[in-house]
Amino acid sequence: MLFFSKRADLQFLCRYRPEAPCVDYQNVDSFIAVIIAEGKATLQELRTIYSLEDAFTLWETIVVPRYNEYLAIEHAKKKRGGD
C-alpha cells in the first residue's frame, strides 16, 4: 500500500466534531458509506472496478468541499457576531 505514504494528511478530520446530534452508520463502514451516499460509486463498483486508492481519491473529493463549506459557515457566523 505504497500510495498511503504519498498521500497528504487531512489533519482537519481530527478537529471536526458536528455540533448537532447525528447518527452514524451501524452496518456499513463510514468511509464506504460516504462514497455511496454521495453517488460517486456504487457498492458493486467499489467491489469490482475501483482500487482502494481510487476509493480514497473519491472520498477526498467529498470530504474536502464539505469541510470547506463548514469553515465558510463558521466564518460567516463569526462575522455576524456568533449565533
Image: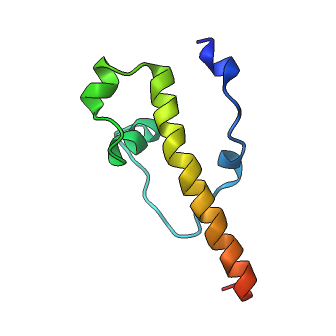
* Relative to 45, residue 58 above or below: below
Q: Residue furthest left?
A: 44
Tell me which residue sits at (66%, 64%) in the image: 71
Tell me which residue sits at (67%, 77%) in the image: 76
Tell me which residue sits at (38%, 41%) in the image: 33
Q: Is residue 52 left or right of residue 4?
A: left
Whole-percent x, y for residue 29 in the image: 42, 37
- Image mark count: 0
Looking at the image, which is closer to me, 23 or 11? 11
Position of the C terminus, as image quadrant, is bottom right
Q: Is residue 40 left or right of residue 44?
A: right
Whole-percent x, y for residue 12 in the image: 69, 48
* Relative to 78, residue 24 above or below: above
The way the protein has been coloured in the rendering is rainbow
* Relative to 19, residue 50 above or below: above
Position of the N terminus, as image quadrant, is top right
Whole-percent x, y for residue 79 in the image: 74, 82
Tell me which residue sits at (34%, 47%) in the image: 37
Q: Is residue 67 left or right of residue 11?
A: left
Q: Residue furthest top?
A: 2
Whole-percent x, y for residue 72 in the image: 64, 67
Classify residue 3 by image quadrant. top right
* Relative to 78, residue 47 above or below: above
